Image: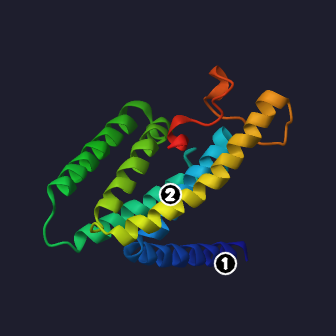
Amino acid sequence: MTTLLLGLALLVVGGLGIALLELLLRRADVAAALVFVSVLLDAVFGNRMPALVLPGGVQVYVTDVVSGLLLGAAMLRLLRRRNFDRYHRWLLLLGVLLLVSLVRGVAAFGMQPSIADFRQYLFFGGVALYFSSFPVSVRLYDRIGRIWLAMTIPMMLLVCLRWLAVFAGVDLGVPASKYGADAAIRVIDGPFTF
């Protein structure tokens, strides 16, 4: 019975993943919303981000799933192109170099430390390759800008709650920033600020 439920759950998750991948092939604004939400979740949870632990001790976070989906959608979009731009070639070369670095890291340091270091580059590379696969459009950039502005509201709420905890001593249960211990005013990390 447990095997049947696990198989059914994997089937549902696989179907949802394929449906989301198909949506990402067409809608860059949905991808931008996913990126912004994953960055917001990373800023909120910090080191206590919930993760799926795979065999071998590798933890899969929300940002890993989002960057993997965007990288997969980017590769599928690039396979449909007849010719590559100069920037696409540079990004693909960066991807090859990152894969070589990952393989060398696994050979030298093991699976978990290599994947932990690689996931930052996967997020950047996947998002950059994905958004470079769409043509320039003022309408699309306007929608992405509106989504970005909407996501600044919960980020500013997080900042205000952390400032309340730091300066007024009002602890509302919001986890502290990962790297903000060196300065009281700095309650979110640099990448989340942008």
Q: How is the image coloured?
A: rainbow
Image spot of residue 28 (x, y percent) = 41, 69
Of residue 51 and residue 167, the one placed in the foreground of this image is 167
Of residue 74 and residue 142, the one placed in the foreground of this image is 142
Tell me the residue at 74%/37% (across/down).
162
Would you call the spot at circle 2 few (<14 residues within 10 Å), some (14-19), or many (20 or more)? many
Tell me the residue at 62%/37% (across/down).
188
Would you call the spot at circle 1 few (<14 residues within 10 Å), some (14-19), or many (20 or more)? few
Residue 180 numbered tag: none
Is residue 115 toward the left or the right of residue 52 in the image?
A: left
For label 1, the SS is helix
Does residue 24 lie above or below 126 as drawn? below
Image spot of residue 10 (x, y percent) = 59, 72
Q: Which residue in the protein does label 2 denote? A: 35
For label 2, the SS is helix
Question: In the rendered image, is residue 171 in sight?
Answer: yes
Q: Which residue in the protein does label 1 denote? A: 4
Tell me the residue at 37%/31% (across/down).
108
In the rendered view of the protein, which quadrant contains the N terminus?
Answer: bottom right
Measure the alpha-carbon separation of dots 2 and 1: 33 Å
